[in-house]
Amino acid sequence: MEPSTRYEEHRHEHRDRNDPFANGDFRMIVLITGASGGFGSVLANLLASEGMTVYGTSRNPRGEGSGNGVTMLGMEITNSESVEKCVGEVVEREGRIDVVVNCVNEMFIGSVEEETAEEVKSLYDTNVFGALRLCQQVLPAMRRQGGGTIISMSSLGGLLAVPYMSAYTSAKFALEAMSEALHHEVRGDGIEVVIMQPVAMRMDRPASGAHLCTVAGAGAASERMLSQMAKDTAASKLTPEMVARRVLEVIRSPKKPLRVPMDRAKPIGLIKRLAPQFVIDRMMAGLVGGLRSEAKRGGG
């Protein structure tokens, strides 16, 4: 019997008549990293409200998740032992993990000349190697149960290399490549991999801060890019709630796409695939020129 068939039978056997899913799905066990705030928190609360058993992670989960149906566990995504312990605890409690969503994300702005190797390594340790650690820990459980879904949160940066954001966009390129390769590696085991590609989401928080900052040695153009990113985020039509709803749709879908572009990621993805390089060069030259001009006018 194929793994995917065994998994569907397992889902049927565990169907709960009180489960809110009209299609008869059993109560899914979901693990969401980075669920203490931002998009991860919104997604965790939504899935819990839809009847799923949701575990969220953060570095320090004390007092978090109470009263909203989300069980918070400690996890440091840059520490292999911590990731192993957290995943093991969920499997021990529930016997399986049906969906994993990696929402942990770090971002900084700076040119290739300005950023240090240590800064880039730190970002990769979270955004790329953190996802790798998580996948390596959940895959054995998903293979044993005959299926599951791994969702990687990419972004517009996974489609287009943006000036002054080389570390972040290159990490998203790496995440997408790793996720796509994993998609091919585990399809035969009934495990599905999905890459979400939202643009910047408008959130109720300061325009810049720990989630969006420049490198220590940033120049005027990088600072201007930070300001522009903050404005774009504040003006974004895409909200965490909208993205969370789309993730919910993907989880429930019997046939999941490899990539789910949202908002401006759709047309930009087409441009990247179909347009000649000189078109992209002109677009980026306009961005770089505008940043430098604004920086000069501002006294940078």
Image (cartoon, rainbow, N blue to C red):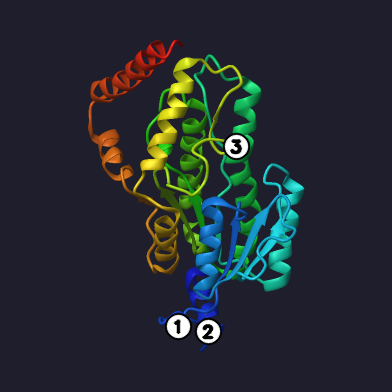
User: Is 176 displayed left or right of 72 in the figure?
Assistant: left
Q: Is residue 290 above or below residue 238?
A: above
Sort mark 3 into few (<14), some (14-19) or many (20+) by Cα contacts within 10 Å.
Answer: few
Q: Is residue 132 above or below residue 84?
A: above
What's the residue type where badge 3 is placed? Ala
| Pointer 1 with pointer 2, Cβ within 8 A | yes
- The label on residue 24 is 1
Closer to the chain start, of discs 3 and 1, is: 1
Closer to the chain start, of discs 1 and 2, is: 2
Query: In 3D space, how far apart are the residues under numbered discs 3 and 2 (Cα atoms)?
Result: 42 Å
Give the quadrant of residue 48: bottom right
Residue 110 x %, y %: 51, 22
| Helix, strand or loop under label 2 | loop
Closer to the chain start, of discs 3 and 2, is: 2
User: Is 299 displayed left or right of 82 in the figure?
Assistant: left
Please give the name of the residue rendered at 24% of the width and 20% of the height, measured from the top-left corner. 278
Closer to the camera, 274 or 74?
Answer: 74
Q: Which residue lies under the disc numbered 2?
A: 15
| Pointer 3 with pointer 1, Cβ within 8 A | no
What's the residue type where badge 2 is placed? Arg
Q: Which residue lies under the disc numbered 3?
A: 210
Query: In 3D space, how far apart are the residues under numbered discs 1 and 2 (Cα atoms)?
Result: 6 Å
Closer to the camera, 9 or 104?
Answer: 104
Please give the name of the residue rendered at 68% of the width and 60% of the height, measured from the top-left corner. 64
What's the residue type where badge 1 is placed? Gly
In the displayed image of the protein, which residue is found farthest to the bottom?
Answer: 17
Q: Is residue 167 above or below residue 238?
A: above
Sort mark 1 into few (<14), some (14-19) or many (20+) by Cα contacts within 10 Å.
Answer: some
Closer to the camera, 3 or 47?
Answer: 47
| Helix, strand or loop under label 1 | loop
Residue 67 x %, y %: 64, 71
Select label 3 or label 2 by which is in front.
3
